[in-house]
Image (spheres, grey):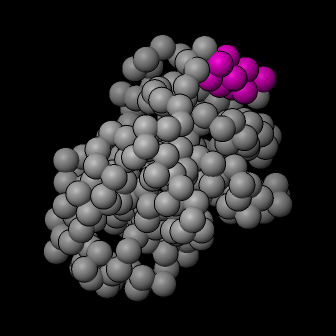
Amino acid sequence: MAGHSKFKNIMHRKGAQDKKRSAMFSKLSREITVAAKMGLADPDMNPRLRAAINAAKAQSMPKDNIQRAIDKASKGEGDNYEEIRYEGFGPAGVSLIIEALTDNRNRTATNVRTAVSKNGGNLGTAGSVSHGFDRLGLISYPVSAGDAEKVFEAALEAGAEDVTSSEDGHEIWTAQGDLHEVAKALEAVLGESEGAKLAWRPQTMVTVGADDAATLFKLLDALDDDDDVQTVWGNYEIPDDVMEKLG
């Protein structure tokens, strides 16, 4: 198991939660509805729904909003969303995987392509960057769940493959097929996680300088502003001194 990693999902970037709470609730609601439609509306019997609800709770989403999203699916209401993945490149040759839930494939494709091309990047074909990532399960816990040693031992016992701990929290990585089993085992020891989902983990990182980092953040913000985009994964690493320079 490895130590600290600076790899971070865009949804965890500092300040994103506070700045865009309403948009985040919308994305979380969409995931809950899709998860409930794809399986049972009972989170105990539907691992994806349980993970979506835990992620919503971790962002302090009101219980009424969560229940409303589940009810929508139970009644067969709301739009039918399709899961789509886009792959491409950002500034400095950074590889990006963009995951979306959409009820209009053409609209989303146009919006994603525009956001990427206007901010120093370009979309590639399916498979153009995903070969440089591993498809794994990712379980996130806050710092308050325990120190690195406690979380490491709990993860090892639960059957996880890797753990990265930092001042931002703990990321526990699992084999793709073991995600929900490991998440359940960890819950008994560490409590509810902030999120448990399939993720893309880069095999190699690209260090990004100040100018490219500023453009990259504009690109990530543009994608994050799109209601259809759920998650963006990248292989970028930004040194602390560059982050300080960008403020």
Query: Horizontally, is 226 left or right of 44 in the view?
Result: right
Place of residue 223 in the rendered image (x, y in percent of width and height, measured from the top left): 67, 36
- Which part of the image, by quadrant, shows the C terminus? bottom right
Instruction: Give x and y (percent) for residue 45.
Output: 23, 57
Residue 111 counted in the magenta span = yes
Which region is colored magenta? 107-118
Residue 140 is covered by the magenta coloring: no
Q: Nearer the viewer, residue 78 or 229?
A: 78
Instruction: Give whichever of 213, 69 is nearer the camera.
Output: 69
Please give the name of the residue rendered at 40% of the width and 20% of the height, measured from the top-left corner.
127
Tell me where residue 2 sits by quadrant.
bottom left
Q: Where residue 19 sits in the image (x, y, percent)? A: 77, 58
Say whether residue 8 is left or right of residue 34: right
* As drawn, 28 above or below 125: below
- The N terminus - image quarter: bottom left
- Residue at image coords 36%, 27%: 131
* Above or below: residue 120 compared with residue 77: above
- Picture quadrant of residue 222: top right
- Image coords of residue 99 (percent x, y): 50, 34
Q: Is residue 52 visible?
A: yes
Q: Residue at x 58, y 20 (%)?
A: 104
The count of marks equals: 0
Q: Is residue 100 left or right of residue 199?
A: right
Is residue 203 among the parts visible in the rendering?
Answer: no
Magenta stretch secondary structure, dominant: helix
Q: Residue at x 40, y 85 (%)?
A: 146
State whether residue 183 is above or below residue 133: below
